[in-house]
Each structure stands twice: as structure tokens, then as C-alpha cells.
């Protein structure tokens, strides 16, 4: 796996704004129960970007068991064995967007505003640079005003805003917002596209 060296630093401990200690690490095969619990704690309107119905436990189990970190790298944040945040780096390994990573962020509703996403995104930025990515993107539905605000504070800028462009699981349309961030590429890793 290409990322082996990059992921050697995990599990890693960190501290939230409130001083409490947390663990950050990539997802593992046996995380399915706690991941399902975490996803079910997030209001459905906030997880439209998860393209499948996560009520299906076997789907979550499948995610945990069939990970390909070179394409999808989910980093988890845990406190006392409970998942309190998740951030994923999606990479296209070919094609014209191979230099652009796509990230998703999700924080447990009880742990928002404590730096969960900031810590996870900082890790993903570091990993993205080491992978030689030039840019990151994030996709949101336009109603996620807090997320838009948070992501702009974390360095993303609006690239596109399309009215009634995406459909949720009930086939209701929502505005689509594409955010982007430029990454300074470390020459040592700048091999994308070679
Ligand atoms: C968006 C989301 C991931 C933010 O997670 P979080 O862990 O609460 O964010 P953090 O605590 O790390 O905060 C990051 C920054 O945003 C600010 N922020 C946090 N919550 C905020 C709020 N409600 N309003 C305004 N700013 C806020 C923080 O102060 C911090 O800014 P700073 O660095 O200037 O201090 C979370 O609200 C969420 O899971 N939303 C639903 C899922 C979603 O829409 N994800 C985005 C799709 S990619």
C-alpha cells in the first residue's frame, strides 16, 4: 500500500479544546459497531453526502472490512472507545482529477466546536501533501450553513454553487456547493501525474 509509511504515526493522541485526550487513527476492520452508532447519532439531513443508507448495518460492516486507504482513507477520532469524529480523504487514482483529493468531515453532535474537525483536517492536509495532491475539494448541500462557515474558517473557498442540483435519499433536491483549497506541494512527494 502506497500510504504505509505515512500512516506509521497512528494511533496518535491529541487534545481537544476542552483539554480532554483523544485518539486519532485510520478505521479498522472491527470498528463497524461503533461506526454505525456514530453515524446514527448524526441527524440524517447532515449526512446527505453519504450516498448509501447507513441504517443498513451490513453496509457499514462492509466499509470497515473492505478498506482501500489509497482510494478512501477514513481517519477516526475516539474518546474512551467511542467515535466522536470522522474525516475521509478520497483520492482518484487516475483521470484529470487525480491531483485533487475530496474530503468529508463529520463530528458527533455532542462534540462540535471542540476542534474535532480541525484536528482531523490538519492530519488529512498533511497526508494529502505527502501523497502529492495539489488541491482538496469538499462538497456540501447549500443548507449546511455551519459546515460552510467552518470549512471556510479551515481554509476552503467556494468554487461553485448550483441551485437544486443534488437529490437526497427521498429524492428532494438541494443546492450543491463545491469548496476548494490549494495545497503547497512538498517537492519530495510531487509525483502525481508522472
Ligand atoms: C462541519 C463540522 C464537521 C464541523 O466540525 P467541528 O468538529 O464542530 O468543527 P471544529 O470544532 O473543529 O471547528 C473548526 C472551526 O470552525 C469554528 N466553528 C465550529 N463550530 C462552529 C459554529 N457552529 N459556527 C461557527 N463556527 C464554528 C470553530 O471555532 C473553528 O474555527 P477556529 O479555527 O477559527 O477556531 C460539523 O458541524 C458537522 O459534522 N456537520 C455535519 C456534517 C457536514 O456538514 N460536514 C461537512 C461536509 S464535508
Image: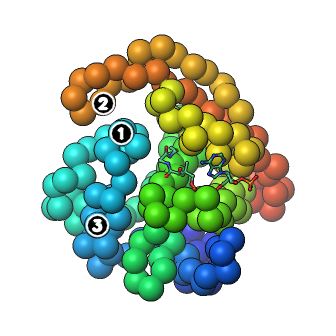
Of circles 2 and 1, the one toward us is 1
**Mark carried by residue 135:** none
Residue in view at x 34 percent, y 20 percent: 173
Q: Position of residue 48 (x, y in %)?
A: 36, 39
Taking 8 as reference, is 119 above or below it?
above
3D distance between C-alphas at marks 2 and 1: 9 Å
Residue furthest top in the image: 163
Whether residues under marks 2 and 1 lie with C-beta atoms below 8 angstroms apart, the answer is yes
Identify the residue shown where x is 45% and y is 58%: 109
Q: Check disc 3 and report its element: helix, strand or loop.
A: helix
Disc 1 versus disc 3: distance between alpha carbons?
16 Å
Tell me the element at label 1. helix
In front: 171, or 11?
A: 171
> In front here: 133 or 188?
133
The residue under label 1 is 45
* Mark 1 C-beta closer than 8 Å to ligand 1: no
Q: Residue at x 61, y 82 (%)?
A: 20
Whether residue 28 is visible to the viewer of this picture, yes or no, is yes
Q: Is mark 2 within 8 Å of ligand 1?
A: no
On residue 168, the disc is 2
Q: Secondary structure at mark 2?
A: loop
Name the disc covering residue 37, or none. Answer: 3
Q: Can see residue 66?
A: no
Residues under labels 2 and 3: Cα distance? 21 Å
**146 with respect to 43 (left or right):** right
Picture coordinates of residue 138 (x, y %)? 57, 39
How many other residues sit within 10 Å of disc 3, few (<14), some (14-19) or many (≥20)?
some
Amino acid at each position: 500500500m502506497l500510504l504505509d509509511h505515512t500512516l506509521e504515526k497512528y494511533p496518535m493522541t491529541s487534545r481537544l479544546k476542552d483539554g480532554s485526550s483523544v485518539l486519532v487513527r485510520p478505521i479498522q476492520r472491527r470498528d463497524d459497531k461503533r461506526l454505525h452508532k456514530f453515524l446514527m447519532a448524526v441527524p440524517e439531513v447532515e449526512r446527505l453526502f453519504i450516498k448509501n443508507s447507513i441504517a443498513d448495518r451490513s453496509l457499514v460492516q462492509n466499509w470497515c472490512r473492505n478498506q482501500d486507504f489509497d482510494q478512501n482513507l477514513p481517519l477516526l477520532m475516539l474518546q474512551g472507545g467511542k467515535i466522536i469524529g470522522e474525516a475521509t480523504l478520497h483520492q482518484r487514482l487516475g483521470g484529470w482529477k487525480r491531483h485533487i483529493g475530496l474530503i468529508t468531515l463529520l463530528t458527533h453532535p455532542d462534540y462540535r466546536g471542540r476542534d474535532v474537525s480541525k484536528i482531523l483536517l490538519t492530519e488529512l492536509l498533511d497526508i494529502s501533501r505527502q501523497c502529492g495532491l495539489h488541491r482538496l475539494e469538499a462538497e456540501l448541500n447549500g443548507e449546511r450553513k455551519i459546515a460552510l462557515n467552518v470549512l471556510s474558517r479551515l481554509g476552503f473557498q467556494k468554487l461553485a454553487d448550483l441551485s437544486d442540483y443534488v437529490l437526497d435519499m427521498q429524492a428532494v433536491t438541494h443546492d450543491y456547493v463545491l469548496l476548494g483549497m490549494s495545497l503547497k506541494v512538498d517537492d519530495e512527494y510531487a509525483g502525481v501525474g508522472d
